[in-house]
Image (tube, rainbow, N blue to C red):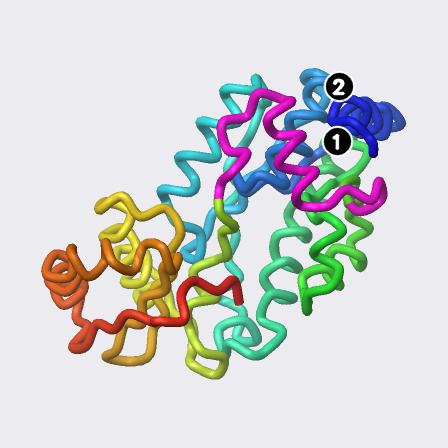
Amino acid sequence: MVSSTSLLEQLQSWMAQFPSVLVAYSGGVDSAVVLAAAHRQLGAAAQGCIGVSPSYPEREMRDAVRVAELCGAKTRLVPTEEHLNPNYAANPDNRCYYCKTELFDRLTKIAHEEGIAVVLDGNNVDDLGDDRPGRVAAQEHKVRSPLVELGINKAQVRTLARELGLPIGEKPAMACLSSRVPHGTPIVPDLLQKIERAEDVLAGLGFEQYRVRHHGTVARIELRVADLPRAIEQRTRIVDGLRALGYRHVTLDLAGFRTE
């Protein structure tokens, strides 16, 4: 079994083939590990870009900036406008393709203009088994995935995060807010803001892994099964908070949290 230290050495050695890198950085554990390892190897020649749009929660942006500051890596906020693309706004099954195309269009342009050698993302080998249209966009833009190329899986990523001193080694997976909307329901900024505020209610009550799925006037809440009893205890505050946002019905999904 390869030790975490050896994995980190491999990752840093992989970074060393480039004079400079630009990391598509979301604040999740995968892209944070890539950014931190790149910074450790390349210093100021490694930087992260955070794509900021209505589908990216402000709380996630704040946390992403904080984590980057902790590891000393330079980051910049890059506004993206995928929601203005009718192909994205229609919310088809391959919505993520249009989102990532918008992001990588902007990042590859920055890299070209500033002479940065390569754009990286945080995909790991466990992602390869999922239906991820965004990976097609990455391939089209020649974005490299160091974790995939080195055969590093999610469990190893979390170990690397601890090795790098990142405080998010056990952070739950975070998907964009548009993933809370059933395919075919149009994506508009006001709807995404409503979902974000609904999830802020849960975050404010101390829940760490959650989704608020939007179904018209119904909010379907997914939590870890172990958190369901606490949600029942907090049901009045949850219901009041989400009804204040315009949901008529607030439901708790007994099947628990799911990543899709």
57 versus 46 height, above or below: below
Horizontal and vertical percent for residue 50? 54, 40
Q: Which mark is residue 254?
A: none
Farthest-out residue, bottom: 184
Within the image, what quadrant is residue 139 found in? bottom right
Secondary-structure class at tag 2: helix
Say few, some or many: other residues with alpha carbon within 10 Å of mark 2 (under 14 / 14 to 19 / 20 or more): some
Tell which of 257 and 140 is nearer to you: 257
Q: Which mark is residue 21?
A: 1
Amino acid type at circle 1 is: Val
Residue at the (42%, 42%) spot, across then down: 60
Q: Which mark is residue 42?
A: 2
Total count of labels: 2
Amino acid type at circle 2 is: Leu
Within the image, what quadrant is residue 97 found in? bottom right
Tell which of 45 and 130 is nearer to you: 130
Q: Is residue 235 magenta?
A: no
Horizontal and vertical percent for residue 6? 82, 24
Magenta segment boundaries in residue numbering: 148-171
Say few, some or many: other residues with alpha carbon within 10 Å of mark 1 (under 14 / 14 to 19 / 20 or more): many
107 versus 245 height, above or below: above
Give left or right: position of 194 versus 14. left
Residue at the (67%, 38%) spot, across then down: 157
Secondary-structure class at tag 1: strand
Q: Is residue 158 magenta?
A: yes
Tell which of 167 and 78 is nearer to you: 167
* Contact, mark 1 vs mark 2 (Cβ under 8 Å): yes
